[in-house]
Image (cartoon, rainbow, N blue to C red):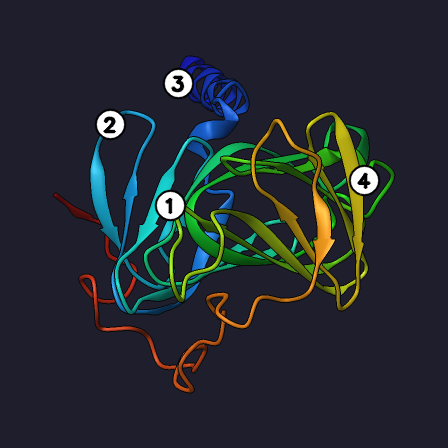
Amino acid sequence: MQTVLNTMRLAVAALAAGMLLPAAVLAQGTVQHLSGTMSVQRADGSVRLLSERSEVRQGDIITTERDSYAQVRFTDGGVVTLRPSSQVRLDNYQFTQGSPDSDGFAMSLLKGGLRKVTGLIGKRGNRDAFRLTTPTATVGIRGTDFVALYVGGQGGAGQPAPGTYVVVTEGSIGMSAGGVEQVVGVGQTGFARSFQLPPQIIPPPPNLPKMEAPQTFGSSQPSAIAGGTNTNCDI
């Protein structure tokens, strides 16, 4: 009888410990497709190469190398696709199926570009739960599908002006800088040169980097690059 009681106590203790684990240690996204090489710097400072089915967590800094595309699917159904030479940080992620009031998704686009297709976060009850921060603007979601690109440097001949560009495919987004929010709708291009200047709607620059991935991207075959399937490789 005592042995049974001890086993039950251990089971209860294990369950309680699991409930107390911080959200940041749990997988909140999964690499769904990868063409090329992608790495992650964890919150503890460790750096790893990722592959398809690798986990993404709050606090991760994710980087795609040149000629590399990656797609991450989150537990709320949202999808982020990264273009080559891009870097993002997952600053905050809160999603519980039965608790829409606690939803939260905050990501920083540090360089390069991404495409975001919205999941349940931002759709069910609190549209302000989503935030994307770039070096020159903050983007709040009001729709479901948009592309964000950050162009650094000084610009020059044949190069788009430095700043953040947002192109909306479906719905609309709110682009904020200089104390002003600019709503960007379907087919429009928003541009923010700096955090001190209001965003504006501009004609699409012909030399803006594209988000088109190679035809093989998104196939059902696991990627053999970056260590194979479901592999995290310490660097």
Residue farthest to the front, as pictured: 157
Residue 114 at x, y percent in the picture: 51, 57
Which residue is nearer to you in this view: 6 or 98?
A: 98
First-in-chain label (2 vs 3): 3
Three-letter code, disc 1: Gln
Q: Residues within 10 Å of mark 1 (few under 14, many from 20)?
A: few
Instruction: Classify the position of the C terminus by image quarter.
Output: top left
Left or right: 32 as drawn, with respect to 130:
left
Is disc 4 placed on a helix, strand or loop? Answer: helix
Q: Residue at x 55, y 23 (%)?
A: 19
Callout in the foreground (2, 3): 2
Q: Answer with mark 4 or mark 1, whichever residue precedes in sequence.
A: 4
Mark 3 lies on a secondary structure that is helix
Which amino acid type is shown beneath numbered disc 3? Thr
In the orientation shown, which residue stands out farthest toward the left? 235
Q: Is residue 48 left or right of residue 80?
A: left
Q: Work out whether mark 4 precedes mark 2 in sequence or the reverse, and give the earlier one.
A: 2
**Residue that carries the numbered disc 2 in the rendered image:** 45
Label 2 Cα neighbours within 10 Å, binned few <14 / some 14-19 / many ≥20: few
Quickly name the residue at label 3: 3
Image vertical order of residue 52 relative to residue 62, above or below: below
Residue 188 placement (x, y as % from top left): 75, 63
Residue 66 position by quadrant: bottom left
The x, y position of residue 43, in whole percent, is 34, 27
**Identity, as a three-letter code, of the amino acid under mark 4:** Arg
**Residue at 47 percent of width and 55 percent of height:** 113
**Badge 2 amino acid:** Gly
Residue 99 in sight in this render? no
Which residue, given by chain and number where applicable, does mark 4 sit on?
A: 127
